[in-house]
């Protein structure tokens, strides 16, 4: 094992971990109980590049686990969601070097400029391809569409602003690239199952319960 590695075990799996005796590191073991006996279909090994993120996440997970007032179901969903995010991020970053350079450039552009108005035709022109060919190559390499990748970045940014600021939904929608508040509400509810305001209120309620 190396620092930052994620190792997934399902019942029956065995993993032996070793660290340098002169420079040891700690591990966080989390058990998720699921009816899916075969596991979640995840790769056995993943890697988190940002070790500072791992340290902070580990400290937060241990702290919340020992806080009896914190809802266990919420903690489970948070831990699993964060770990799955890292798995997906590692998979994308690992594959990125295998992508054609126009696809790499498109992904980099979306990641940096997701809040700007963007037409897929513009990305296709940046790649030097027709829209149809751009769509076909993008889907073949990523298993999704450019529009879905763009929407994912916008929704992630909206979630971050909802829990870290008091900005109104209308402003968050504008700053995250949505046409208006209605577009954000529709996309958010379809993805998360809650309206942005309901999501924010649930988060704040949990924070207040934890602090109280």
Image (cartoon, rainbow, N blue to C red):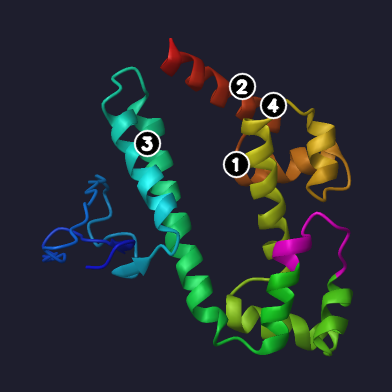
Q: Are marks 1 and 3 in contact (CB under 8 Å)?
A: no
**Residue in the picture at 24% in, 46% down:** 30
Residue that mark 1 sits on: 192
Nearer to me, 14 or 130: 14
How much space separates mark 2 and mark 3, taking CA atoms?
A: 21 Å
Lower position in the chain sequence, tag 2 or tag 3:
3
Lower position in the chain sequence, tag 4 or tag 3:
3
Residue 63, compared with residue 177, is above or below; it is above
Judged from the image, the secondary structure of the residue bearing numbered disc 2 is helix
Nearer to me, 198 or 21: 21
Residue that mark 4 sits on: 197
Which mark is in front, 1 or 3? 3
Q: For mark 1, does the 10 Å Cα neighbourhood hold few (<14), some (14 to 19), or many (20 or more) residues?
A: few
Q: Are marks 2 and 4 in contact (CB under 8 Å)?
A: yes
Judged from the image, the secondary structure of the residue bearing numbered disc 3 is helix
Number of numbered discs? 4
Q: Does any portion of residue 195 appear in the rendered image?
A: no
Residue that mark 3 sits on: 60
Q: Is residue 116 magenta?
A: yes
How much space separates mark 4 and mark 3, taking CA atoms?
A: 25 Å
Lower position in the chain sequence, tag 2 or tag 1:
1
| Res. 72 image quadrant | top left
Q: Which mark is residue 12?
A: none
Q: Which mark is residue 201?
A: 2
In the picture, the quarter occupied by the C terminus is: top left
**Residue in the picture at 77% in, 42% down:** 184
């Amino acid at each position: 094992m190396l620092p930052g590695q994620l190792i997934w075990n399902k019942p029956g799996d065995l993993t032996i971990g070793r660290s340098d005796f002169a420079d040891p590191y700690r591990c966080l073991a989390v058990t998720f109980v699921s009816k899916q006996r075969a596991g979640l279909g995840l790769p056995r090994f993943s890697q988190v590049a940002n070790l500072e993120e791992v340290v902070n996440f580990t400290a937060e997970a241990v702290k919340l686990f020992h806080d009896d007032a914190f809802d266990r179901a919420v903690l489970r969903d948070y831990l699993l969601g964060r770990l799955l995010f890292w798995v997906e991020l590692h998979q994308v970053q690992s594959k990125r070097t295998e992508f054609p350079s126009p696809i790499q450039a498109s992904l980099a552009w979306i990641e940096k400029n997701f809040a700007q108005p963007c037409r897929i035709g513009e990305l296709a022109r940046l790649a030097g391809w027709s829209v149809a060919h751009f769509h076909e190559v993008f889907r073949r390499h990523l298993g999704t569409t450019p529009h879905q990748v763009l929407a994912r970045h916008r929704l992630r940014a909206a979630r971050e602003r909802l829990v870290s600021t008091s900005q109104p939904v209308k402003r968050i929608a504008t700053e995250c690239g949505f046409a208006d508040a209605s577009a954000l509400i529709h996309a958010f509810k379809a993805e998360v199952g809650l309206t942005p305001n309901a999501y924010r209120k649930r988060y704040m309620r949990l924070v207040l319960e934890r602090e109280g």
